[in-house]
Amino acid sequence: MGIAACTAKPGLNLASKACMVKKQVSAEEVQRYLGPPQEVERLPDGRVVWFYYHLRRDALAAVPFLGKKFGREEIEVLRITFSAGRVVDCIYYVTKPRS
């Protein structure tokens, strides 16, 4: 039960990388695979949550003036929860950027 891959940073393949994070994998192994988290949250019960983000935008989103109205932007989020230094939950989702 581990993480099998050779890339070091989250990015275009964040969804597929999320599939590789298995329960009971150590925080060190996750960090070796994904790099340091972009955000860390400590919960009152002692669990720690790491967040990785990737902004996806289509080609139209980059066009000046038109991009804001017709382009599409989404934020991929990978939320990994640890307890005692081991993965207990891994959730991938896509959301819209806040305006």
Image (spheres, helix red, strand yellow):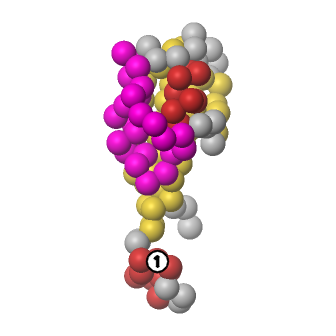
Depth check: give the residue in front, 79 or 62. Answer: 62
Vertical arrangement, residue 53 with respect to residue 17, above or below: below
Residue 89, image x, y percentages: 42, 24
Residue 91, image x, y percentages: 40, 34
Instruction: Give yes or no for residue 39 being in the magenta stretch.
Output: no
Question: Mark 1 falls on what kind of element?
Answer: helix
Residue 90, quarter of the rendered image: top left
Which residue is found at the position 51% from the left and 45% from the top? 10
Residue 55 visible (yes or no) = yes
Which residue is found at the position 46% from the left and 36% from the top? 6
User: Quadrant of the image for the N terminus?
Assistant: top left
Q: Amino acid at mark 1?
A: Ala
Residue 82 visible (yes or no) = no
Residue 26, image x, y percentages: 52, 17
Task: List the single residue furthest toward the front.
Answer: 6
Residue on which disc 1 sits: 61
Residue 24, quarter of the rendered image: top left
User: Quadrant of the image for the C terminus?
Assistant: bottom right
Mark 1 is surrounded, within 10 Å at the Cα level, by few (under 14), some (14 to 19) or many (20 or more) other residues, namely some
Depth check: give the residue in front, 86 or 44. Answer: 86
Left or right: 46 as drawn, with respect to 58: right
Q: Main secondary structure of the magenta part?
A: loop
Residue 9, image x, y percentages: 54, 44
Instruction: Give yes or no for residue 3 being in the magenta stretch.
Output: yes
Q: Which residues are magenta?
A: 1-23
Which residue is found at the position 49% from the left and 85% from the top? 63
